Amino acid sequence: MKNYHINIFYSDEDEAYIADIPDLKYCSAHGTTQEEALHEVLIAKEGWLEVAREEGIPIPEPTYRPVIYQVGI
């Protein structure tokens, strides 16, 4: 299985770094550094996948690719 794309950006409103996984609806986390946000969203991803398996929710294949990576496809 391929890895899911993770976006990390700074939110002035939240005064924190936000990390989200576009392919996993509502899967996001925050931290005071980019590394902390990444660490937290990886924990959130495991929880998201665990609940999906337990509840029989379909787990989407990783498909999200930011525009920058789509050049030349």
Image (cartoon, rainbow, N blue to C red):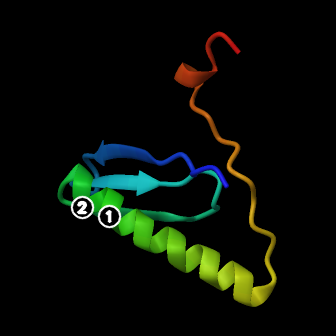
Callout 1 crowding tier (Cα within 10 Å): few <14, some 14–19, many ≥20:
some
Q: Position of residue 4 (x, y in %)?
A: 57, 51
- Position of residue 72 relative to residue 15, above or below, is above
The reply to whether discs 2 and 1 touch (Cβ–Cβ < 8 Å) is yes
Q: What residue sits 28% from the left and 57% below the top? A: 14
Callout 2 crowding tier (Cα within 10 Å): few <14, some 14–19, many ≥20:
some
Q: What residue sits 81% from the left and 83% below the top? A: 56
Q: Residue furthest bottom?
A: 54
Mark 2 vs mark 1, CA separation in Å: 5 Å
Q: Position of residue 44 (x, y in %)?
A: 47, 72
Q: Position of residue 5 (x, y in %)?
A: 54, 46
Q: What residue sits 79% from the left and 77% below the top? A: 57
Left-right relation of 8 to 54: left
Q: What residue sits 19% from the left and 54% below the top? A: 33
- Position of residue 55 relative to residue 26, above or below, is below
- Position of residue 69 relative to residue 62, above or below, is above
Q: Which residue is mark 1?
A: 39
Corner quadrant of residue 37: bottom left
Q: In which quadrant of the rendered image does the N terminus lie?
A: bottom right
Question: The residue under label 2 is which amino acid type?
Answer: Glu
Q: Which residue is mark 2?
A: 36
Left-right relation of 70 to 7: right
Tell which of 25 and 68 is nearer to you.
68
Tell which of 50 and 20 is nearer to you.
50
